[in-house]
Image (tube, rainbow, N blue to C red):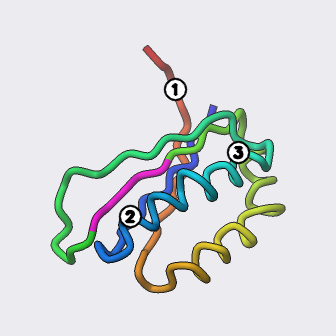
Amino acid sequence: MYIYNVTINIDPSIQHSWLEWMQNTHIPDMLATGKFSQAKICRVLVEEETGGITYAVQYQAPDRDTLQRYYQEDAARLRKDSMERFGDKCVAFRTELEIISQH
């Protein structure tokens, strides 16, 4: 299993609209690609020196090939939607994590 982790720092002025959009639109759209089995949103509790509010959004994919297909087939469209809605009021950093074990 792999986790596609997106850490996003958002401007406090969009916090409520961003969170609502994530829960009601973006995450359902991500899951609708058929490439992720689940998703979770976590608030990062460490305060950033640059300000803002930081969240980590984690999407679980069954394997690396499926994650690569997401990049090729869906990522540009879904990222564009975010940029059009929120512009420079949010900054994202993406990482891939391989699950070694779960307890």
Callout 2: SS:
helix
**Membership of 56 in magenta stretch:** yes
Residue behind mark 2: 16
Which circle marks residue 31 in the picture? Answer: 3
Locate the C terminus by quadrant.
top left
Callout 1: SS:
loop
Write down the quadrant of residue 91 in the picture. Answer: bottom left
Marks 1 and 2 sit apart, C-alpha to C-alpha, by 34 Å
Q: Residue at x 44, y 46 (%)?
A: 41
Locate the N terminus by quadrant.
top right
Label 2 environment density (alpha carbons within 10 Å; few <14, some 14–19, many ≥20)? few
**Membership of 22 in magenta stretch:** no
Residue numbers of the magenta segment: 53-57
Tag 2: amino acid: His
Marks 3 and 2 sit apart, C-alpha to C-alpha, by 21 Å
CB of mark 3 within 8 Å of CB of mark 2? no
Coordinates of residue 46 in the picture (x, y in percent): 19, 55
Q: What secondary structure prevails in the magenta region? A: strand
Which circle marks residue 100 in the picture? Answer: 1
Mark toward the start of the polypeptide (1 vs 3) = 3
Query: In this picture, is 38 found above or below 89?
Result: above
Q: Residue at x 55, y 37 (%)?
A: 98
Q: Nearer the viewer, mark 3 or mark 2?
A: 2
Marks 1 and 3 sit apart, C-alpha to C-alpha, by 23 Å
